[in-house]
Amino acid sequence: MGPLYRPLLCLALCVLACSSSSSTNVAHDTGLDASVMREAAPPASDASLESAPSDAESDGPEDARPDVLPSGLFGRMTFYELASTQAKELALSVSFGPAFFHDYDDRQGGTGCIADHFDATSRPLPRDVDAGLIRVSGFLGGTTLAGDDGSNPITCAIGGSYYGCTYPEGANAFAAQFAPTSMPFGPAPISFAGNGGNDFSAFYVSGPPNVGTLSVGDDLTALRYDPSRDTVLHPTCASGCPGARIAVEVTAFPLASAADGWPYPSVGVVRCVFEAAATVAVPHGAIAAALTYDLSLDAVETAVVLLPSARLQTRDFFGNSFTADVGRGVVGTSPL
């Protein structure tokens, strides 16, 4: 099952490490990307990272400290190539908005977990603000298992309350599935470019995924989450992994609503970021915060993703923060 919740994961959850973005990885981009680079604020330099603001000041809407919310707007995108037994999936998420408090937050020193529970009645998902048209480019793509054109680039536009993203011929780009043996990411740097809208001005970042290969010694289709105990996973990273980060993204949702797509009537989400290690543990407190005794949640998807040592980051003309992560990993859906 494809993760139809991807727009939520980006808005609700985030990685913590900052990075500079290089303006040299742009030869493959034209059109929107080129015009955005002329308008966007320059990416953060390596030197500026040494004196970067605190997490609460520099990170996206989901990265606020428990005691204070940062001002301004925050853009956040992720683009992952995820392998399952049935397919390779390109999973995209996008969100733009102000900061908000999390139901659970134990982050310290660039690693840790955050978790939230959303439902349409008591805590609806915050709406996106207008950042204009956004383009994701630099990947190989191809024909999806559904027979749709999943080629480069992806275009995102705000419609109603949230951003929607499509491939050139209109196929949904949040969770497109390709043949299991395909390589839809390819080796090229992935670029994120926005031309600016009513609330967020132009931005541009570009960078490649980690070159390492991630596997997990756990059956993600049989994984069980218990609010009373930590869930331990066993990732293995081969080649190119020193300094890498591992993200674990957990989404609990009503299986009966999966076919209708986002937004779900209720959903629980956890995102953890760890330094590369042989075992990583999703804390039971985060699991409890995401589930909140919601009996309608009966399925859970787990994605384990290998990320570069630092994420892509820049600011728009008004000082609003934009961050992005590109990574490869594995995914599976299990009963809750």
Image (tube, rainbow, N blue to C red):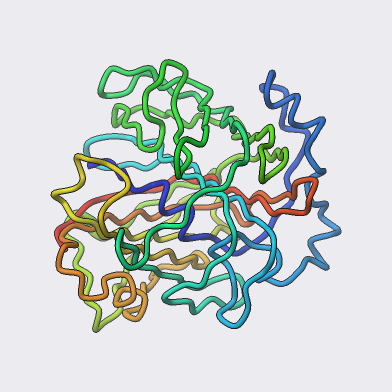
What residue is drawn where x is 25% and y is 50%? 332
Quadrant holding the C terminus? bottom left
Q: Is residue 290 left or right of residue 61?
A: left
Q: Nearer the viewer, residue 152 or 317?
A: 317
Quadrant of the rendering where the N terminus is positioned? top left
Q: Is residue 216 left or right of residue 15?
A: left
Q: Residue at x 45, y 70 (%)?
A: 114
Could you tell me residue 48's position as x and y percent?
84, 59
94 and 3: which is toward the camera: 94
Residue 67: percent from left, percent from top: 60, 83
For the view shown, which residue lies furthest in the right direction?
47
Relative to 322, say whether 146 is above or below.
Answer: above
- Residue name at image x 78 percent, y 66 percent: 52
Tell me: residue 51, above or below residue 20.
below
- Image location of residue 317, percent across then percent down: 80, 46
| Residue 309, position as x, y percentages in the image | 61, 57
